[in-house]
Amino acid sequence: MKNIFKKTSVALCIALLCAFLTSLSAMAALEPVVIDRNVRSNFDGFDFEFWIQNRGEEAAMTLTGGGTFECWWDGVLNVLFRMGKRLGSVATYEEYGEVILEYAAEYELLGGSVFYLCVYGWTQNPLVEWYIIESRGSYKPPGGAALGFVEIDGGTYEIFESTRTNMPSIEGDQTFQQYWSVRTENRSEGTITISDHFKAWEEYGMDMSGNMYEVALCIEGFRSSGNAKVTRHVLKIGDEVYGADTLLLTGEDEPNAEDDTPGVPSEDTDQPNITEPIVTGGNNDDSGNDSSFPIVPVIAGGAAVVVIGGAVTAISVKRRK
């Protein structure tokens, strides 16, 4: 009887293990998820954010996995689509080591002059917002004269510094510095050695001693219309590599399994409580500016689970078969 019980237990464990592995395999192949209102969360190993300044304006972001995404916007005041890693402001770039991004993108500016394809991020203590502009519209940010030039990754970048006074930031309305590297010739694919830009800024007296809060590949439109598609996105921060195409940076046979697993809900303490579940569809109302960041879909066992007013709600998410 004991032997029968043991055999049954072993068979049950094997069956459960197989089911678990099958579930993980299914989770790795996600159907695209469409976002059309302000969201900050994570998906397939990357943190992402969709932010539009005015509710009621038309824009959307489609998450396609492995750090890639598509987006479009039509006559908006200001919109950002970004995908990368929020690092929690626990270490400086020097402590992380080399920071590199490999990317490929397509874009079309259909109206207006202000558009950026860039790497974007923040540091804290001191608070700094920074941009590495790879492609842009006819407007060259941030205006004014360049501090100088630097050659990085086979291209020439102009270096700028600007000040934002009592403006929105990751710490609320603050006065802070902005640092810029603006490529003199647009490109839409290649390697960006982000840490080399940080070093170049420091040579011009710009303070990059703060802890890294975020680094992300970003599409931004201001008073413009257009669309873009990121088809490759591999981010290396020190020894960690994120993205489906890790062969570009690591030479490994396959990606780290941990990076391939869909994300978990963001628990950033600087975000408001969840106000509504957002996975696909739906329209914003016309109630004016919107700067909220509801936290949404996180893939777990075939459903996105969110908390609304203390209640747990499951929202089904389609997956590729």
Image (spheres, rainbow, N blue to C red):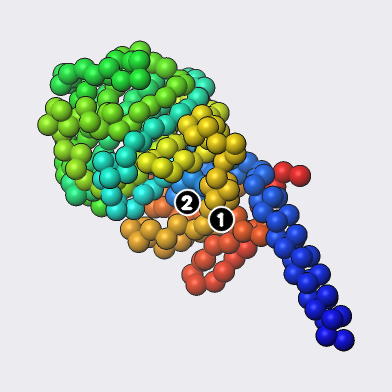
The residue at 55%/45% (across/down) is 256
Q: Is 80 or 99 nearer to us in this picture? A: 99
The residue tagged with tag 2: helix, strand or loop? strand
**Residue marked by disc 2:** 41
Pick whichever of labels 1 and 2 is earlier in the sequence.
Answer: 2
The x, y position of residue 154, in whole percent, is 35, 15
Q: Amino acid at mark 1?
A: Val
Residue with the most extreme front position: 3
Residue 111 placement: quadrant: top left
Q: Tags 1 and 2 in contact by the CB under 8 Å rule? A: yes
Q: Count neighbours of disc 2 (C-alpha within 10 A) and say few if under 14, some if 14 to 19, many if 20 or more.
A: many
The residue tagged with tag 1: helix, strand or loop? loop
Horizontal side, residue 1 vs residue 177: left or right: right
The quadrant in which the N terminus is found is: bottom right
Q: Is 79 or 267 nearer to us in this picture? A: 267
The x, y position of residue 103, in whole percent, is 47, 27
Q: Count neighbours of disc 1 (C-alpha within 10 A) and say few if under 14, some if 14 to 19, many if 20 or more.
A: many
Residue 183 placement: quadrant: top left
The residue at 34%/25% (across/down) is 133
Give the number of marks.
2
The x, y position of residue 252, in whole percent, is 55, 36
